[in-house]
């Protein structure tokens, strides 16, 4: 997994009382439900676009458009690459986001196994869940 390079950067809305792990789990669950396979998902730090907070991600998946559409279908705002620029979609509104905001050096990286790994969901199992 560590030899897989990331190609695509995006961000997903984080809601009040959520943490980065919950948003990463949402991204991976949504990808799995859509049959979207990739090897790696890197979770970066939090950014704000207007009044909305996002978690930045990077993945080896080259085209995230299907994943972004599925997340928007769940009511999430997203920032995704579109024809060389980053576009934020919040509800029905869209706008551009400076690439520096999405591509800046991350402060805190957590790497998750992607949906192409058979046991990807087990990385979210807590000690208590595994013992019940």
Image (cartoon, helix red, strand yellow):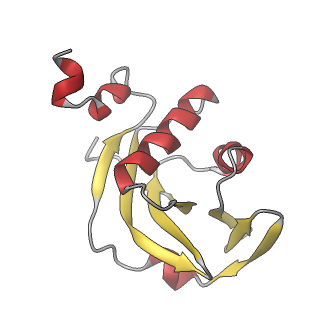
Question: Most extreme residue toward the right, as rendered?
Answer: 92
Q: Quadrant of the N terminus?
A: top left
**Direction top: furthest residue:** 132
Residue at 54% of width from left, 29% of height from top? Answer: 32
Question: Quarter-wise, where is residue 45 in the image?
Answer: bottom left
* Residue 34, quarter of the rendered image: top right
**Position above or below: 116 against 102:** above
Q: Residue 16: horizontal and vertical position, in percent?
A: 48, 62
Q: Split into 4 quadrants, where in the image is the C terminus? A: top left
Residue 98: tell me if it is visible. yes
* Front in this rendered view, residue 7 or 10: 10
Q: Residue at x 47, y 75 (%)?
A: 47
Q: Is residue 74 above or below residue 43?
A: above
Q: Residue furthest front?
A: 17
- x, y percentage for residue 41? 40, 48
Q: Is residue 116 left or right of residue 112?
A: right
**Number of on-image labels:** 0
Residue 119 picture location, percent across and down? 33, 22
- Above/below status of 102 relative to 110: below
Between residues 13 and 118, which one lies in front from this camera angle? Answer: 13
- Would you say residue 37 is visible in this rendering? no
Q: Residue at x 46, y 65 (%)?
A: 56
Residue 103 pos. (x, y %): 47, 75
Residue drawn 69% across the image and 51% down it: 75
């Amino acid at each position: 997994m560590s030899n897989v390079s990331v190609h695509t950067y995006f961000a997903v809305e984080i809601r009040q009382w959520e943490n980065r792990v919950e948003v990463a789990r949402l991204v991976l669950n949504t990808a799995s439900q859509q049959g979207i396979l990739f090897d790696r998902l890197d979770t970066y730090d939090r950014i704000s676009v207007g009044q909305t907070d996002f978690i930045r991600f990077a993945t080896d998946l080259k085209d995230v458009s299907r994943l972004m559409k599925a997340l928007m279908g769940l009511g999430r705002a997203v920032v995704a690459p579109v024809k060389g620029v980053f576009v934020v979609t919040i509800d029905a509104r869209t706008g551009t986001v400076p690439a520096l905001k999405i591509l800046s050096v991350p402060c805190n990286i957590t790497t998750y196994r992607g949906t192409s790994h058979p046991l990807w969901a087990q990385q979210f199992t807590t000690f208590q869940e595994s013992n019940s």
